[in-house]
Structure formats: C-alpha cells, structure tokens
Amino acid sequence: MWPGLFYGLSKLPSHNQFIVVANHSGMGSAELWSLLVGWHERFGMERPVAGMAHPAAFRVPFLRPVLQGLGAVEATQMGACKARLADVPLLIFPGGDHEAMRPYWQGDRVDFAGRKGWIRLARKHGLTIEPMAIVGSHKTLPIV
C-alpha cells in the first residue's frame, strides 16, 4: 500500500456489519479513486464494499455500468438494503455534493450539510459507524 496515504484500514471490524462515513472534497475524484485502489490493495476481491452514489449518477447511461461494476449502490434506503442483503459493508459520503463543491478556503470544514440519514441507516441495519477523515483532496481540484 502507498506509504502515508491510508491509515486505519486494518482497524476496520472483521465483520461486515459496518458503515464507513466519510467527508467529500474536491469533487471527490482523487479521494474516490485512491480509496478504491487502497481498499483493493488491502482486502482484494475477498471483501467488497458498496459505495453509495447519488441516484442521479445511475441515470447516466455510460456511468451506470461503471458504478455497478465497482459495486456501488444508490444512496437510498433501497440501495442500502441491497448491499446489506449481500452482506457487504457500506461506504457513504453524507455531505456529497455540498462538501465536494465547497470553496477551497473551507477545505478543512466538515458538516455533512446537516444530513443525518446515515445515522438512521446504521440504526435500521444494526451497523457499526466507522468514521473516515479525508484531508487534502480539496487541493487537487480547487473550487472558488
């Protein structure tokens, strides 16, 4: 794994009853691809994760098969149920568009736009909440 890039993946629970809750930055491009590579290097194909993506992304014809191929599900209750039925842990970015588009000078702020659905999701499915902090990726695509 890339030294200094990821910390703590080895501390995730050994079971799949968890949800990784992370912040978004810089349109999400650098962090998403880095996370996918890091997750695959750490766990390989033996431990997939279902990243929850905005439902609108699944309506884009060329993007839908890519998302599905990566194991993504819609960021809805139904999408979460689909992943949980497959016994796959979830990865969610509650602040989504709000945090991905925040200005460069607010890159150190995380507020999830006040969204709390992920808490209800964790309670409903009995999931352990695993926080993940992403820092610095807002510098890869500065937003004014």
Image (spheres, rainbow, N blue to C red):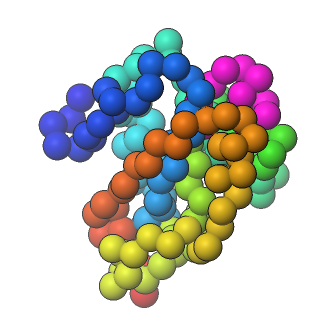
Q: Examine the structure image and report whether residue 81 is included in the region drawn in magenta.
A: yes
**In the depicted structure, whether residue 72 falls above or below residue 24:** above
**In the depicted structure, whether residue 56 falls above or below residue 131:** below
Q: Residue at x 77, y 57 (%)?
A: 56
- Which image quadrant: the C terminus? bottom left
Q: Residue at x 41, y 41 (%)?
A: 35
**x%, y% of residue 132?**
40, 49
**x%, y% of residue 93?**
56, 55
**x%, y% of residue 141?**
38, 69
Q: Residue at x 34, y 23 (%)?
A: 42
Q: Report the front residue among 1 and 29.
A: 1
Magenta segment boundaries in residue numbering: 80-90
Residue 114: image quadrant is bottom right
Count of numbered circles in the view = 0
Residue 63 appears in the figure: no
Q: Report the front residue among 86 and 105.
A: 86
**In the depicted structure, whether residue 45 falls above or below residue 33:** above
Give the residue furthest to the top.
46
Residue 113 appears in the figure: yes
Q: As drawn, is 141 to the left or to the right of 74?
A: left
